Image: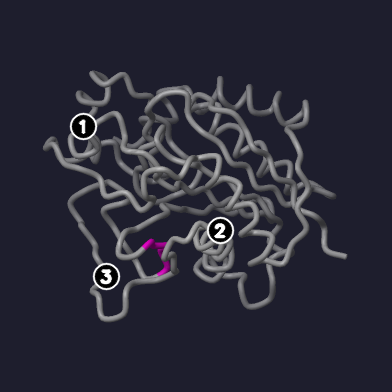
């Protein structure tokens, strides 16, 4: 029988601790006997996560500071994602547990995002994976905003990008991080990236709670990936590892601002 997936419905945390926990779970998963893990979580204040190789010049630091936002650099790649109004997830799984034919970056992304699509569909949303037939792929080259870039492997609801996701692989295990915008953000996303006020398109209709989306995503993974789900929590070792990573890595300027 395939190894069950551990699902953690976590609380809202700081930006540094959220990234540290995702890395700690990635490291834990890579160890012998480590289980695949899906963590769903939130943020205790508006925050901006920057891609591993993204330059800080993509972001208006003056506005972020004036808005009281936390900024953190992710262990995964991609462009910047605004958090605090979203459902965020971190998925860790050993590479040898990924089904045959899905081991590449793009194919593993599609395999994992099938769980998100299934979950959103269960909420009567028109979710799909890929660009609309006949639509051009949108690539706004002059902004660092993840949700201003759409590609053929993105999850969308109707014509709106519904998930920003990125991946990293280390020690024989994969970490995929992602965000599903739910509510309208309390800060101006346009001023973060372009210096101009702009409104964010939301893929989720008002009235659907974060809790409902989390529950739907868990069930979507169970059905789409054909996996067994076990509710779980963080181990003491994972918490201690995360505290160290948050203090010595993710809360430091040396890590966050290493690429200007």
Mark count: 3
- The residue beneath circle 2 is 119
Q: CA distance from mark 2 to mark 1?
A: 34 Å
Q: Regarding mark 3 in the picture, which secondary structure is present there?
A: loop
Q: Position of residue 4 (x, y in %)?
A: 80, 55
Residue drawn at x 34%, y 37% as measured from the top left: 259
Between tags 3 and 1, which lies in front?
3
Q: Position of residue 140 (x, y in %)?
A: 20, 57
The outermost residue toward the right is 1
Residue range corresponding to the magenta coloring: 153-157
- The residue beneath circle 3 is 137
Q: Regarding mark 2 in the picture, which secondary structure is present there?
A: helix
CB under 8 Å between callouts 3 and 2? Answer: no
10 Å crowding of disc 2: few (<14), some (14-19), many (20+): many
Residue 102 located left or right of residue 229: left
Quarter of the view holding residue 97: bottom right
Q: Identify the mark nearer the N-term, 2 or 1.
A: 1
Give the quadrant of the C terminus.
Answer: top left
Q: Is residue 135 above or below residue 9?
A: below
CB under 8 Å between callouts 3 and 1? Answer: no
């Amino acid at each position: 029988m395939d190894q069950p997936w551990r699902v953690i419905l976590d609380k809202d945390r700081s930006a540094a601790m959220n990234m540290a926990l995702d890395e700690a779970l990635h490291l834990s998963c890579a160890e012998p006997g480590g289980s695949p893990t899906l963590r769903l979580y939130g943020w205790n204040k508006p925050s901006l996560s920057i891609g591993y190789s993204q330059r800080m010049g993509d972001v208006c630091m003056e506005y972020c500071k004036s808005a009281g936002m936390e900024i953190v650099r992710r262990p995964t790649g991609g462009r910047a994602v605004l958090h605090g109004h979203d459902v965020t997830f971190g998925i860790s799984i050993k590479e040898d547990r990924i089904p045959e034919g899905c081991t590449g970056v793009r194919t593993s992304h599609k395999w994992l995002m099938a769980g998100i699509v299934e979950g959103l569909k269960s909420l009567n949303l028109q979710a799909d994976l890929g660009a609309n037939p006949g639509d051009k792929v949108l690539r706004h080259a002059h902004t660092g905003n993840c949700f201003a870039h759409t590609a053929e492997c993105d999850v969308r609801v109707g014509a709106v990008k519904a998930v920003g996701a990125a991946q990293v692989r280390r020690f024989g295990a994969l970490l995929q991080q992602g965000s599903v915008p739910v509510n309208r953000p309390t800060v101006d996303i346009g001023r973060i990236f372009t210096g101009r006020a702009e409104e964010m398109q939301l893929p989720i209709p008002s009235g659907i709670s974060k809790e409902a989306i989390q529950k739907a995503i868990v069930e979507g993974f169970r059905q789409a990936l054909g996996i067994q789900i076990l509710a779980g929590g963080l181990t003491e070792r994972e918490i201690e590892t995360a505290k160290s990573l948050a203090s010595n890595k993710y809360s430091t300027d040396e890590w966050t601002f290493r690429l200007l």
